[in-house]
Image (spheres, rainbow, N blue to C red):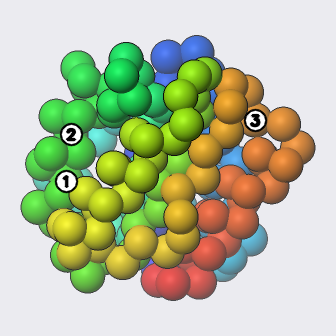
Amino acid sequence: MKKAAVVYWSGTGNTEAMANAVVEGVKKGGADVELFRVDQFGADKMDGFDGFLFGCPAMGDEVLEEDEFEPFFTEAEKKLSGVPVGLFGSYGWGDGAWMESWAERTRTAGAKLVADGVMVENAPDDDGVKACETLGETLAKAL
């Protein structure tokens, strides 16, 4: 069975809630899945997975979290060519520029982006949870 990793960073718990919904979606899609906080996962572990769902909220001036997630993702980019990937994250301000630039960066790395990134303002409501589940299911079917 194909296997996906859900790797996220969360400061308030909002992106963590999204990650849990993404995991449920992957399961519904029929793939195996493991959930990791970014501090539990490194690019060296990527070879054991067929696809990835990355979650990070907008930080500062709509950028990825800079201390843990950004360094991880910089290394991960080197291993994304041809790999199915989905992106998700929460925000509390702005217009989603961080997700647009993250998606473009992921495409430039050669990843097969399975959908537009899922963004939720603050905590995910029912629609946000559903969007996260759909993202996970879409990735599972792309593996």
Judged by depth in the image, the label closer to the viewer, 2 or 3, is 3
- Which residue position holds label 2? 72
Task: Please report the residue visible at 19 percent of the width from the left and 67 percent of the height from the top.
Answer: 109
Does residue 62 sit above or below 130 in this rendering? above
Classify mark 2: helix, strand or loop: helix
- Which residue position holds label 1? 76
Which amino acid type is shown beneath numbered disc 1? Answer: Ala
Q: Are marks 1 and 2 in contact (CB under 8 Å)?
A: yes
- Residue 76 position within the rendered picture, expressed as x and y whole percent measured from the top left: 19, 53
Instruction: Give the alpha-carbon distance from disc 1 to disc 3, as whole Å.
Output: 26 Å
Classify mark 3: helix, strand or loop: loop
Q: Is residue 9 visible?
A: no
Which amino acid type is shown beneath numbered disc 3? Answer: Pro
Residue 90: image tag: none
Q: Do the residues labelled 1 and 3 touch (CB within 8 Å)?
A: no
Whichever of callouts 1 and 3 sits on the residue coming sooner in the sequence is 1
Does residue 21 sit above or below 12 in this rendering? below
In this rendered view, identify the residue nearer to me: 113 or 29. 113
Judged by depth in the image, the label closer to the viewer, 1 or 3, is 3
Task: Please report the residue visible at 62 percent of the width from the left and 64 percent of the height from the top.
Answer: 136
